[in-house]
Image: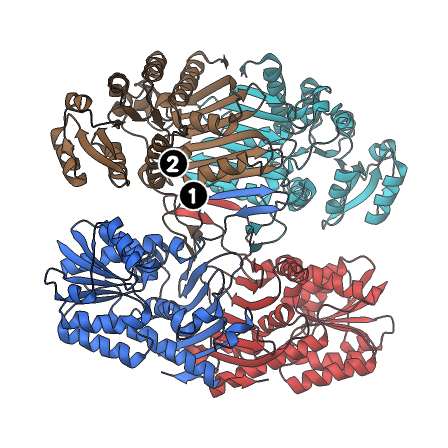
Chain colours: A cyan, B blue, C red, D brown
Amino acid sequence: MRHVALFGAGRIGRIHGSNIAALPGVSLKYVCDPVGDAAAQLAAQLGAQVATPEQVFADPQVDVVAVGSPTDTHSDLIARAAAAKKHIFCEKPIDLSVPRAEACARAVKDAGIACMIGFQRRFDPTFNEAKERLARGEIGAPEMLVVTSRDPGAPPAHYLKGSGGIFRDMLIHDFDIFRWILCGDGDEAATLYATGSVLIDPEIAKVPDIDCSVVTIRTRRGRLAQINTSRRAAYGYDQRFEVLGSAGMLQCGNHRPSEVVQSDAHGVRADKPEHFFLQRYREAYRLEVTHFFECLQTGQPFRTTIEDGVAAQKLADAAAQSLESGKVVTL
Amino acid sequence: MRHVALFGAGRIGRIHGSNIAALPGVSLKYVCDPVGDAAAQLAAQLGAQVATPEQVFADPQVDVVAVGSPTDTHSDLIARAAAAKKHIFCEKPIDLSVPRAEACARAVKDAGIACMIGFQRRFDPTFNEAKERLARGEIGAPEMLVVTSRDPGAPPAHYLKGSGGIFRDMLIHDFDIFRWILCGDGDEAATLYATGSVLIDPEIAKVPDIDCSVVTIRTRRGRLAQINTSRRAAYGYDQRFEVLGSAGMLQCGNHRPSEVVQSDAHGVRADKPEHFFLQRYREAYRLEVTHFFECLQTGQPFRTTIEDGVAAQKLADAAAQSLESGKVVTL
Amino acid sequence: MRHVALFGAGRIGRIHGSNIAALPGVSLKYVCDPVGDAAAQLAAQLGAQVATPEQVFADPQVDVVAVGSPTDTHSDLIARAAAAKKHIFCEKPIDLSVPRAEACARAVKDAGIACMIGFQRRFDPTFNEAKERLARGEIGAPEMLVVTSRDPGAPPAHYLKGSGGIFRDMLIHDFDIFRWILCGDGDEAATLYATGSVLIDPEIAKVPDIDCSVVTIRTRRGRLAQINTSRRAAYGYDQRFEVLGSAGMLQCGNHRPSEVVQSDAHGVRADKPEHFFLQRYREAYRLEVTHFFECLQTGQPFRTTIEDGVAAQKLADAAAQSLESGKVVTL
Amino acid sequence: MRHVALFGAGRIGRIHGSNIAALPGVSLKYVCDPVGDAAAQLAAQLGAQVATPEQVFADPQVDVVAVGSPTDTHSDLIARAAAAKKHIFCEKPIDLSVPRAEACARAVKDAGIACMIGFQRRFDPTFNEAKERLARGEIGAPEMLVVTSRDPGAPPAHYLKGSGGIFRDMLIHDFDIFRWILCGDGDEAATLYATGSVLIDPEIAKVPDIDCSVVTIRTRRGRLAQINTSRRAAYGYDQRFEVLGSAGMLQCGNHRPSEVVQSDAHGVRADKPEHFFLQRYREAYRLEVTHFFECLQTGQPFRTTIEDGVAAQKLADAAAQSLESGKVVTL
């Protein structure tokens, strides 16, 4: 039986907590959150106890910590978990600073513990099916990737102040998809160009940040990737990618709440995509923690390592640098 | 060079006339229509002359007549064309009376002329592609057929008075599709059950006629067909069929004016189907007369013979009889 | 807290058991199954105890029994549960005999207990969305229904011996869909015609049974329904319906394991439908028992009553009678 | 009656010739091609005469020349037609050299003749429908554009020697789509970044040229465009674009030869896209010349002017410069 302490009782913490608590062979022992009410409520719901970080790290029975707390707490919690020799499941990103993220990776390695970063999109049934077909060679060698990643609506500008900017906050997932799909055989980004605009909310310019962006990456082997991202898609959460290979193409479409198609005087209408990430990636979040504990048990490598986390953040940094300089960045 | 006389300068006559006039090796010589203005206008547009039926049948240069005049003129024109030894392309149906249709078939046979009936749906690129795949065995042996056939809106009730009823006027095409798809190897209908209702326009009940119908046919070999038909589909002309075989299914979807998909707050919306038969079957009408003249030239058999016309009308008669009696009809 | 006893630890029993055990406010106390190993394993997995029916009905703490045992045990268990004043969730059908099913309905009514029949399709997210849009009038008044219901493969003929025949075993669900969609305002079937064939496995003829069927129902108000069913669809479990209304159409499409579309030299290929009912209706089964316990709590009426169960079986009986006689049956 | 002389009896010349010859009020008088047999055959087929350029430009009856000859003849023919005061329909591009193209535009302007460049994609029913909806504001203000443009297979490397490179030869159409869709209100490209690779055929590197490319354009108003292009899509000619607006998205999908969907053990398979440009843009080519002659008649402006032709070539030049330098180009 694995005993787990969960950090964070907010939106993402509740998802991970529920999924962890439902796993056979896993016991959610503690919930930690500075907002005591949230911690108490989630703990009660999942049959766990409220605890302080000190209690968690001092308890020898706890062998896993799951980190779903705010981004700026991640690196500290990883460091303390590594010191206490507890395995880590940490929501992305490791840290907004690449050097601090790298320090985390070193600490994890030195401690000899297991650490997985929560890039849940790799567990999405559609995305993963595409990855598996690609790996089986069903479309030959990969050549080009087009990623479309759009939120249903922009958050208030003030929310974006601590986000690290659109590349670190939002495209971090898309950079990971790029590496997962186009660099599976050891290839890596060679050059990156990013640009963007404020087209949705002028307040976002004052953060300062942008709300629409396009990124181009060319790999060492000459593969080409384009990412387009917007904070606002009036039709909902738009999460697609398509990969062109030498023998075909794989397209990952959106998921819909139902398969009803309505034909009337206005046209032939299917559902909008699932509303946002909690709906679209509900199954991915579940499969992600299942995978984490299975790998702990079997010793198999994680699908998303802390090194993957660092690598995605380096691409986000390069994009921010390209945007600022207006120039192509060599990696 | 084939010299052709066209009977009928109305909606369907104009279609056939234009398609015939555009064919290489074919010359549209005459247009006949009791409405002199319509005949004159179409003749002028297509470079033909206006003529009376007498002139047509007396002109030895004419070797083909194309019949696109009202239904109640078909059998007489076929008989006269047969007597004059002129080949015939005749818009469906042969005649609302099966005995008269059979007499036409005999006249054609005795005269040794070629006669094709215009079941244009067999030339629709989608329907024909399905037929060819079926014939190649791509879904194994055919077992079940579901035909959906709905008009965009009901005509005024008075228009239906001379129509022969929904089965002879509208489902005649669907009965032909049934035979083409499910009876291609010599199988034939064994039993037929039809029922229906007036759900759209109470005036139609006074014709008397119905505006919605469902028909079930079982063949001698036990294959099963269902046809559903309505005089009104609020979303446009709905023309689909699907055939289940021992190794798969073929579905024929509607054609759309464009492949634009619009995603907005209301959903993900494709175009409605093509508006009505003139749009949906525009290409089918063109391919149909092309086929007719090719077969005349090569001696190959027509895809839709006068015997097919008679057979479809017998099914329409059986359906009318089933509706009236409320009983299953054995063929 | 509701305490529940589950009858049946086979395929469907395990589904219901797992879903019940995961509900808040509900405790699965007992699992009963004459196959002791199956009962013990499921009880252990879900934290319940193995019990005999006698123990269940004698335990005053149990206030709900969930019946997922073989069909021929349903009516006896319903009768005993009614006698013991325990609420009932019973997998369809009530009983293969309509009189026995009616007796169950009377016993339930006399006992004043709640009883819901497991027509899980009414809880499928796609089907239910269509029902809700229909109820909101989005396509006007319903006029025609086409139900397509095909299994991925025929079971061995011997399995069908005790099934009651295709209409009672398989179409029972489709008859319920018909009533749910087309009779929601008090309309009912007026005439029914069914026919069918053995096209898949000649052994099925010896049962005797058929493996493909088509059913036509006309309601008192003249609405029209067609159902087509096959024991074998080479492409998987095909579960669709479409309803035409005065202002449009609603089509319920199949669910797919992923939204990957692969384009290659062979075409543009989407996934096959979910393999079979355990996959397609996984969510429906979960929502169904959730609904049951919510209604118990709130006193709201069930979406699928025991009267619905009886009514569907009457249609199945009528279909069997129509098939045997070759005639239209008046209800 | 307009009298037209056609230059070029090759693949594209035959298309334009047939479409022109079928127009009412237009007479194709001459066909010119240095390959005498091709000219003679096409002229015979379309009822025209073979002529030399000298005869064409000397004939006062000819008031329109249609240029479908090889690219390196375009600018000379435009200049001679302008000098002879004949209106011009010219297949894209004007000339591989921007200065020469600009000289053509000046010559046309000075001569006061009408000149339209054949960007047929603007006449594609799907693309044009999207443009019209955008213009009507159905998705609000345009923000991002993603263009996918892939050929079914790479031509032999030697064919590409005189092509001007992938940007001038292939993406010229995509640059025009960019301007048409994203710059309809006077916006223009501000910066452009292009990169690419040889992933299909190493011989193409020796031309030198590339066979896959990605281009990013940012407009003065901050709108963002991404174009991805490959010389090889194993599934056929892939011609799509999608535009994100403040209130929704418009996606232009591929056209298919038929609407058959085949479901079998391998999946649910639709047709591949239309094979190549002759099939996909058949209707666009027809509508394009129809538009040309209508505008000549009515004096309405052309949808694609010679200035549009120059503008697209400037973007192609910028892309070539970006590829060569590895830097972002400011326009």
Q: Quadrant of residue D114?
A: top left
Going by the numbered disc 2, the residue's amino acid type is: Ala
Q: Quadrant of the N terminus of chain D?
A: top left
Name the residue tied to disc 2. D233
Rate crowding at label 1 as few (under 14), some (14 to 19) or many (20 or more) other CA atoms within 10 Å.
Answer: many
Callout 2: few (<14), some (14-19), or many (20+) C-alpha neighbours within 10 Å? many
Q: Disc 1, disc 2: CB below 8 Å?
A: yes
Instruction: Tell me the chain of label 2.
Output: D
Query: Measuring 35% from the left and 41% from the top, which residue is drawn there?
Result: D283
How far from the left and from the top, in percent, is residue C48?
78, 64
**Where residue B193 sits: x, y (%)?**
45, 79
A173 sits left or right of B278 in the view: right
Query: Whole-percent x and y of residue B318?
Result: 39, 80
Which quarter of the picture shows residue A67? top right
Q: Is residue D82 left or right of residue B56?
A: right
Rendered position, B261 above or below D121: below
Q: As rendered, which of D67 and C127 lies closer to the eye?
A: D67
Residue nearer the viewer, C331 or B26: B26
Determine the secondary structure under disc 2.
Answer: loop
Q: CA distance from mark 1 to mark 2?
A: 9 Å
Q: What type is the residue that disc 1 sits on?
A: Ser
Residue A110 seen from this side:
yes
* Percent position of residue D288, x then y: 35, 35
User: Which numbered circle lies on residue C263?
Assistant: 1
Out of C236 and A298, give the one closest to the viewer.
C236
Look at 32% across and 55% down and name the residue there: B284
Q: Say yes or no: labels 1 and 2 on the same chain.
A: no
Count the marks: how many? 2
At a point 15% along the width and 69% down the height, the residue shown is: B113
